[in-house]
Image (tube, rainbow, N blue to C red):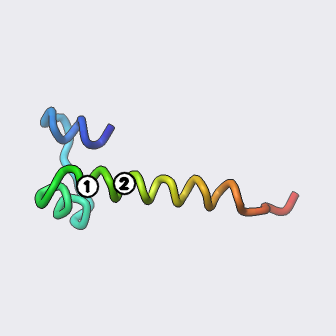
Amino acid sequence: MTFFGIRLWLIEEVNLIMDFLYTIEPLLFLSVKAVFSGFLILNSTSTNFPT
């Protein structure tokens, strides 16, 4: 959603690192977002929380 918001000039990326990646290559920006999201999903599903 961030990618489409940036492309349509509806929002701007505030994170300096992600803004830099988007400036270099939008596909790199999407790839990093996907990898981080996947990592967070895997990490949250594999963690055993105390009940």
Q: Is residue 24 above or below residue 1?
A: below
Q: Is residue 5 above or below residue 44?
A: above
Q: Measured from the top left, where is residue 31 in percent x and y? A: 32, 54
Q: Quadrant of the N terminus?
A: top left
Q: Measured from the top left, where is residue 19 in percent x and y? A: 19, 59
State the residue at coordinates (84%, 62%): 50
Answer few, some or many: residues within 10 Å of disc 2's Cα (few below 14, many 20 plus, some between 14 and 19).
some
Number of marks in the rendered image? 2
Q: Quadrant of the C terminus?
A: bottom right
The residues bearing labels 2 and 1 have C-alpha atoms spaced at a distance of 6 Å
Name the foreground residue: 7 vs 16. 7
Name the foreground residue: 2 vs 34. 34
Q: Amino acid at mark 2?
A: Lys
Q: Is residue 2 left or right of residue 43?
A: left
State the residue at coordinates (24%, 67%): 17
Residues at circles 2 and 1 in contact by the CB criterion of under 8 Å = yes
Q: Give the label on residue 33, or none.
A: 2
Element type at marker 2?
helix
Q: Amino acid at mark 1?
A: Phe
Read off the residue under disc 1: 29
Answer few, some or many: residues within 10 Å of disc 1's Cα (few below 14, many 20 plus, some between 14 and 19).
some
Q: Give the label on residue 13, or none.
A: none
